[in-house]
Image (cartoon, rainbow, N blue to C red):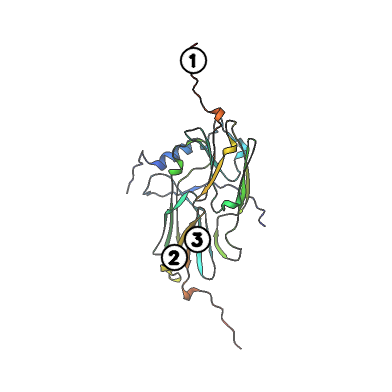
Amino acid sequence: MTAQELAPKEKQEVHEKEQTRPGRTYLPDVDIYEDEHALWFLADMPGVAQEQVEVELHDNVLRLEGRVSLDQYEGLTPAYTEYNVGNYLRRFTLSSTQHFDRDRIVARLVNGVLEVKLPKTEAAKPRRIPITS
Amino acid sequence: MAVFPNPFNELLRLQQELEGLLNRPASDLSFGPSAAGVYPPVNVFRNKEGDLVIRAELPGVKAEDIDVNCEARRLTISGERKPETDGKAAYHRRERPSGKFSRAIHLPADLDVEHAEARFQNGVMTLRIPRAQAAKPRQIAVQVA
């Protein structure tokens, strides 16, 4: 169905004046989409384990952060490299947080992809308005 | 808050090691200029036993959609990253492409391809190919004649 070929992308580094941790941090690639029940965020965070992910909605800023596990690199000497590894961080400002149910936000990590679901409140769900004659 | 780079920070050390080789063709393991621009990017390591460890980031790809093939000294990593939605969702942002990929790598000669192992964890594939017994250093006892 999808005959398209994937092309490699260079990782974009996060440039912030204040870094709380040493080492490089990258911007994960993100898809944002909505269906009738929720707003979904998918962020590519390869190499990050479930317990090293932080998802936080503070005021109207959604912060997605993942720290890469390094135990897989123990005892290995690089011989040839094409990409670097690092932590991931991305923030999104939501325009209308009152449309989401803050208490029911769910996040999970599947095959290196962080999935965050922001369920819509009843008031924000689409409604078909019947037309009566 | 200012943070001094900690010289003992593991991540920093690994990043510097990887960075050091990024723009420099490696001596015995160069895959040539054609290697650039092919998905997925790979990092190649040696462990203490001399085994070759090839790692590739494949987030969002299912383990069953990855194919690793080895024919003589030619290793092929291929597969497909399938879209997460059926195309009916309304997208606000789309940065994660889907599609097929295939990449060939010419392996060094000192490996035992028969005993290669591939693992896929947290979106990262790790392929370990042990060093051939014949290539391992061996101590030769000196006999008194």
Label 1 to label 3: alpha-carbon separation:
69 Å
Instruction: Please state the chain letter of the residue tagged with numbered disc 3 in the rendered image.
Output: A
Q: Which residue is mark 1?
A: B143
Q: Which residue is mark 2?
A: A105
Q: Residue at x 38, y 45 (%)?
A: A22
Three-letter residue code for mark 1: Gln
The local secondary structure at tag 2 comes to loop
Q: Nearer the viewer, mark 2 or mark 3?
A: 2
Three-letter residue code for mark 2: Ile
The local secondary structure at tag 1 comes to loop
Question: Looking at this view, is A11 or B138 the one in front?
Answer: B138
Where B139 falls versus A83 (above or below)?
Answer: above
Disc on the earlier residue, 2 or 3: 3
Query: Do marks 2 and 3 share a chain?
Result: yes
Percent coordinates x, y for residue A128 in the rendering: 56, 78
Percent coordinates x, y for residue B91 in the rendering: 56, 63
Where A130 falls versus B55 (above or below)?
Answer: below
Q: Nearer the viewer, mark 2 or mark 1?
A: 1
Question: Looking at this view, is A40 or A60 the one in front?
Answer: A40
Q: Residue at x 54, y 60 (%)?
A: B93
Describe residue B128's horizontal placement relative to residue B70 as left or right: left
The local secondary structure at tag 3 comes to strand
Q: Nearer the viewer, mark 1 or mark 3?
A: 1
Dot 2: within a 10 Å radius of its alpha carbon, few (fewer than 14), some, or many (20 or more) residues?
A: some
Three-letter residue code for mark 3: Phe
Q: Which mark is residue A69?
A: none
Q: Residue at x 52, y 28 (%)?
A: B136
**Labels 1 and 3 touching (C-beta < 8 A):** no
Label 2 to label 3: alpha-carbon separation:
11 Å
Q: Which mark is residue A41?
A: 3
> In the image as oriented, which residue stretches furthest toward the front?
B145
> In the image as oriented, which residue stretches furthest toward the bottom?
A133
